[in-house]
Image (cartoon, rainbow, N blue to C red):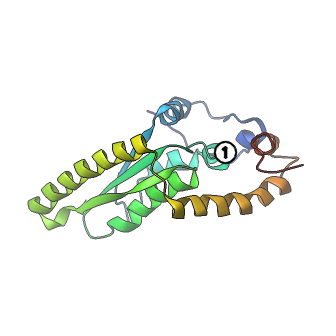
Amino acid sequence: MKIKFCIACDKCHKTGECSIKDDFPALLTKLLEADGIIWSSPNYITNITAQLKTVFDRSPLVVHEQLFDGKYSLSLATAGGNEIDFVLGIMNNFTIQCGGSSIGGTGCSMSRGLEAIEAAIEKSREMGKDLVEAIKEKRQYPEQEARQKAWKEGFKYSILAHKDHWTHNCDYWMEKGWIKE
């Protein structure tokens, strides 16, 4: 897949469509059709890869419109050292920021050897099964829902401040009943 960087042209906020012609729309369609998403990234200098970051950066409508509502995610990471939790947090937070629920994540420091790698693989399998169960039972995460509610309450002021420019976002939020004119 070829996914280009966001150029911050604001077309998505105005029209609901991206001006960049690449493979992102096909990927987004697959993400929106899925009940569960597994994010995965090696630790690149205490961060996710540039490729995954580009996917996240191309997703303002997913965030602004909370399009992952009802979706669940699991995050997986590897690292040469011990900086796994921060990387997992980036992926978990993205799902929550997009309106979805994260069941958490797991990872492995590759420098800890084969036994640690095998244990991480088993933990990943267990968490994959838990992801399926979370989807089936429509598991709720009150602390994540509270974060989403607080975000919406604060972000509505951004929508209102840009209502003449972000016409698609404003119309969407009014249609959802998240803001009033």
Q: Is residue 154 left or right of residue 134?
A: right
In this rendering, position of residue 131 left or right of residue 71: left
x, y percent for residue 36: 42, 41
Q: In the image, what residue type sits under mark 1?
A: Glu
Residue 66 spot, x, y in % from top left? 62, 47
Of 136 and 103, the residue lying toward us? 136
Question: 161 and 19: which one is in front?
Answer: 161
Dot 1 falls on a residue whose secondary structure is: loop
Expressed as whole percent of the image width and height from the top left, the position of residue 96 reads 53, 55
Give the side of residue 164 with respect to residue 89, left or right. right
Quarter of the picture holding the N terminus: top left
Q: Residue drawn 69% across and 57% down?
A: 152
Q: Is residue 157 above or below residue 166?
A: below
Q: Which residue is mark 1?
A: 65
Residue extending farthest front: 137
Residue 177 visible in this rendered orientation of the protein: yes
Q: Is residue 157 above or below residue 178?
A: below
* Residue found at x 71% / y 36%: 16
112 up-or-down from 174: above or below: below
